[in-house]
Amino acid sequence: MRRCRICGKGYLSTVRRSHSMQATKVRLYPNLQWMKLSSGQRIKACVKCIKTQQRKMVALAA
């Protein structure tokens, strides 16, 4: 599924409107990327979670 394994973020359901105001249903998906955990496991996570994880790792190293 297209869902972040860390925060559980999924798609948003919305409508796109043309010039004539005709509505078309669309799904807006989160920006999911592969991420490697310290255990060696690969998961799909949203970029916001990946950035947060990197900040935590830098704070621990300092």
Image (cartoon, rainbow, N blue to C red):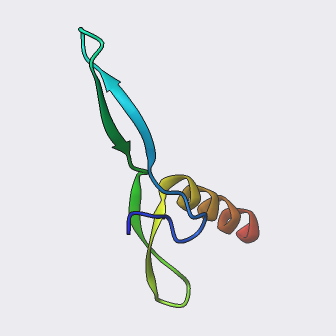
Q: In this view, does 43 lie above or below 50?
A: below
Q: Is residue 10 above or below residue 17?
A: below
Residue at left offset 50%, top offset 65% = 4
On the image, the x and y values in percent for residue 8 come to 57, 64
In this picture, residue 8 sits left or right of residue 16? right
Q: Which residue lies furthest to the bottom in this view?
A: 39
| Quarter containing the N terminus | bottom left
User: Which of 41 and 62 lies nearest the eye of the viewer?
Assistant: 41
Q: Which residue lies furthest to the top in this view?
A: 20
On the image, the x and y values in percent for residue 33 come to 39, 62
Instruction: Locate residue 54: give its quadrant.
Output: bottom right
Q: Residue furthest front?
A: 22
User: Which of 56 and 13 lies nearest the eye of the viewer?
Assistant: 13
User: Which of 58 and 53 lies nearest the eye of the viewer?
Assistant: 53
Residue at left offset 49%, top offset 58% = 46
> How many numbered circles are shown?
0
Q: In this view, does 2 lie above or below 12?
A: below
On the image, the x and y values in percent for residue 2 come to 39, 63
In this picture, residue 28 sits left or right of residue 46? left
Residue at left offset 40%, top offset 59% = 32
Instruction: Locate residue 28: give its quadrant.
Output: top left
User: Which of 51 and 16 lies nearest the eye of the viewer?
Assistant: 16
| Quarter containing the C terminus | bottom right
